[in-house]
Amino acid sequence: MIKAYDLLLELEMIGTEQNRKVYRRHGVTGYQFGVSFANLKRLAKRIGRNTSLAEMLWCSGVQDARVLAAMVADEQSIMECLLDRWLADLDNYILTDAFADLVGRTRFALKKADEWSTSLQEWVGAAGWNLVAQLALHDPTLKDVYFTEKLESIEEHIHERPNRTRYSMNNALIAIGVRSPALEQAALAVSDRIGKVQVDHGETSCKTPDARAYILKTIQHRKRKNKTPSKDGVVL
């Protein structure tokens, strides 16, 4: 049986100062070991799905352990109340992205997308809009009207939301724009009206993608590759 204590020791051993410096530049301010994502993914594959272990890892408060917890938690059995507790601990975009990836695999994805995307809190809002993007890319059951309403919200609120929430809203705009031809036109129009989205990426070389350019580039790439719908029904 894999124990959380042993995993924490292993994480500490494979973390590096160079990675800690990189993560700090990307906004990680809490305690961390500096484990690369390649090593986190390797550990997650070895562990498999284990929500009990994930809870213990998350409770450690260590950034790397929490990212790993989001990777190994069982999306089929995890409880909504646990997700809500973890939500309150989000304090950087790396952890928020990993957490949203987990929630997006659960039966609560749609509910939490609607609930969290209206939040004025930076990381809650970012998680919510990450979920909207995941739904746009991977859930073929939702009607266009659902995403049309999200586009209206993006247009109305994106410039007044906190920094990383704006970034996630911009990503959701792109994801919606590549979902269907009708939504493509609607998203392009919204992109034109909102203009440039300003996001502070700190001491990194990261850039905020131009939604119009990214949508059109993705559509053209699909046409060149003559891609067909994926197994879940959405062209990716």
Image: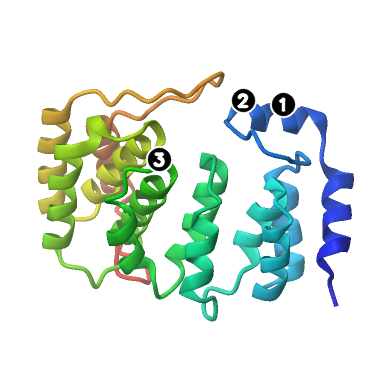
Badge 1: residue crowd in 10 Å (few <14, some 14–19, many ≥20): few
Q: Residue at x 77, y 67 (%)?
A: 46
- Distance from disc 1 to disc 2, alpha carbons, whole Å, reads 6 Å
Q: Name which quarter of the figure residue 164 lies in.
A: top left
Q: Secondary structure at mark 3?
A: helix
Q: Are marks 3 and 2 in contact (CB under 8 Å)?
A: no
Q: Are marks 1 and 2 in contact (CB under 8 Å)?
A: yes
* Residue situated in front as seen by the camera: 104 or 38: 104
Residue 101 location in percent, x, y? 49, 58
Q: Which mark is residue 100?
A: none
Label 1 vs label 3, nearer the camera = 3
Badge 3: residue crowd in 10 Å (few <14, some 14–19, many ≥20): some
Label 3 vs label 2, nearer the camera = 3
Residue 207 location in percent, x, y? 43, 24
Say which label, 3 or 2, has the lower sequence index: 2
- Distance from disc 1 to disc 3, alpha carbons, whole Å, reads 23 Å
Q: Secondary structure at mark 2?
A: helix
* Residue that numbered label 3 is attached to: 122
Q: Which mark is residue 25?
A: 2
Residue 1 location in percent, x, y? 85, 78
User: Which residue is situated farthest in the bottom direction here?
Assistant: 77
Amino acid at pointer 3: Glu
* Residue situated in front as seen by the camera: 221 or 156: 156
Residue 226 location in percent, x, y? 29, 53
Specify the color scheme: rainbow
* Residue situated in front as seen by the camera: 199 or 184: 199
Q: Name which quarter of the figure residue 24 lies in.
A: top right
* Residue that numbered label 1 is attached to: 21
